[in-house]
């Protein structure tokens, strides 16, 4: 691509789309590059109850993100779908090389987010898509009237467990401690849900089955006791959904941008260690990873990119 954009935004989750909206409104020529679906983790979140103004019954992550996408487009942000393979961010003109094309801009906003952590049990890889999932919204319907297990104890695990009860006949949360990390308001709903059971102080040690997942061994971390969970004979399988946190999508920037445990370090204005390179959303070191903080980061990054270009 010959054009040199004012700003390229990498990633179209809440941070990237908010950056696109603000950059577009500032009349910066803006390109948003996304490798897959818009929305990042929000694309696979059923219920968002804490984004200010998001109180409409039946609203979901995908419907919220669809409006963000529309709004960024309305203000002129251009879009391309590509997987970026390498970056050269040191000079005045930044270059991003993808599978399909090469893209250039005066400023770059990295909003690549994070992806779900694997459960970490034996045989996990063999059963992803064959019983193991990391997305309730995507896969819950496959488990209509089956039993499912949710690994984790944070907001994601408990909220997604509640969503899964709309499909599965029973949902068991397997948590490595004896109390949940999830917000109290979310916990209360889960404890009141008759379809949700708990296996406390427990981790999944291994999963098994011929083709589909129908057996797993769960270890009690306090007593060492091993429990074998087998699918009901009539069912022939069960589901395991992992929600134990996220890994940052930052491999592309290793050795290029300063990081902490794979998260990009920025100042409060989203500046990274390289001039003209900003990071926004879950990819950066921060204390609260939420849609509202991602969107705020994106807005700040875009305004700082404008300031950088003008100066
Ligand atoms: P999280 O808050 O980091 O929770 C991860 C959970 O997985 C914790 O309970 C943790 O156990 C457990 N865990 C971590 N590693 C594990 C391992 N190797 N084996 C077994 N269990 C393990 O992650 P999250 O729930 O995905 O949430 C991420 C961020 O998004 C949070 O800031 C959360 O508030 C936010 N979020 C908000 C909403 C909402 O408000 N609607 C929804 C989803 C996410 P321990 O508790 O023992 O550490």
Image: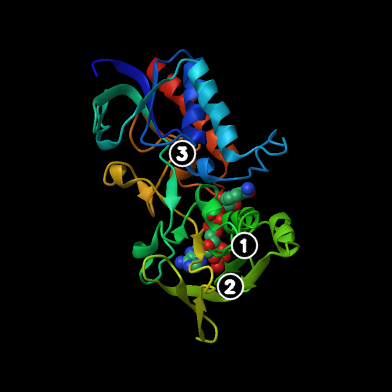
Labels 1, 3: front one: 1
- How far is the residue under mark 1 from the one under mark 3? 28 Å
Q: Does the Cβ of the disc 2 residue fall within 8 Å of ligand 1?
A: yes
In terms of image quadrants, where is residue 271? top left
Q: Quick check: marks 3 and 2 in contact, CB under 8 Å?
A: no
Total numbered badges shown on the rendered structure: 3
Question: Do the residues bearing badges 2 and 1 touch, measured as CB atoms within 8 Å?
Answer: yes
Q: Residue 30 location, x and y as percent?
A: 40, 19
Where does residue 267 sit, x and y in percent of width and height? Answer: 46, 39
Specify whether 307 is left or right of 250.
right
Mark 3, secondary structure of its residue: loop
Q: Which mark is residue 181?
A: 1
* Image location (x, y in percent) of residue 46: 60, 45
Of 88 and 193, which appears nearest the observer?
193
Residue 221 to residue 235: above or below = below
> Which type of secondary structure does the marked residue at label 1 adopt?
loop
Q: Residue 5: image x %, image y %? A: 33, 18
Which quadrant does the C terminus fall into? Answer: top left
The residue at which mark 3 appears reads as: 267
Among the two numbered marks 3 and 2 on one chain, the one whose residue lies closer to the N terminus: 2
Q: Label 2 to label 1, Cα distance in Å?
A: 9 Å
Q: Residue at x 63, y 71 (%)?
A: 198
The residue at 38%/18% (across/down) is: 309
Q: Which of the two residues, 130 or 29, is positioned nearer the viewer here?
A: 130
Q: Pointer 2: what residue? A: 177
Q: CA distance from mark 3 to mark 2?
A: 34 Å
For the residue labelled by badge 2, is the local secondary structure a helix, a strand or a loop? loop
- Taking the image as drawn, is residue 28 in sight? yes
Q: Is mark 1 within 8 Å of ligand 1?
A: yes
Q: Which mark is residue 55?
A: none
């Amino acid at each position: 691509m010959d054009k040199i954009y004012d700003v390229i935004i990498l990633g179209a989750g809440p941070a990237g789309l908010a950056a696109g909206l603000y950059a577009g409104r500032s009349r910066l020529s803006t390109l948003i590059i996304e490798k897959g679906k818009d929305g990042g983790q929000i694309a696979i979140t059923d219920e968002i109850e804490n984004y200010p103004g998001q109180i409409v019954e039946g609203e979901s992550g995908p419907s919220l993100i669809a409006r963000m996408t529309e709004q960024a487009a309305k203000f002129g942000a251009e879009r391309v779908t590509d997987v970026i393979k390498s970056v050269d961010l040191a000079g005045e003109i930044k270059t991003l090389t993808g599978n399909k094309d090469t893209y250039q801009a005066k400023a770059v906003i990295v909003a690549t987010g994070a992806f779900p952590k694997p459960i970490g049990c034996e045989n996990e890889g063999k059963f992803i898509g064959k019983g193991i999932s990391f997305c309730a919204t995507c896969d819950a319907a496959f488990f209509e009237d089956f039993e499912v297990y949710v690994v984790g104890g944070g907001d994601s695990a408990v909220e997604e467990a509640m969503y899964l009860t709309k499909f599965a006949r029973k949902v068991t949360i397997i948590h490595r401690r004896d109390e949940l990390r999830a917000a109290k308001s979310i916990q209360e709903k889960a404890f009141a849900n008759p379809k949700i059971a708990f296996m406390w102080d427990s981790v999944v040690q291994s999963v098994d089955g011929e083709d589909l997942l129908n057996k797993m061994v769960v270890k009690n971390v306090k007593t060492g006791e091993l429990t074998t969970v087998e699918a009901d004979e009539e069912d022939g399988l069960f589901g395991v959904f992992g929600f134990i946190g996220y890994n940052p999508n930052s491999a592309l920037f290793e050795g290029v941008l300063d990081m902490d445990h794979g998260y990009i370090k920025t100042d409060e204005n989203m500046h990274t260690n390289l001039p003209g390179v900003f990071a926004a959303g879950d990819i950066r070191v921060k204390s609260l990873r939420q849609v509202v903080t991602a969107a705020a980061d994106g807005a700040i990054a875009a305004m700082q990119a404008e300031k950088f270009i003008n100066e």
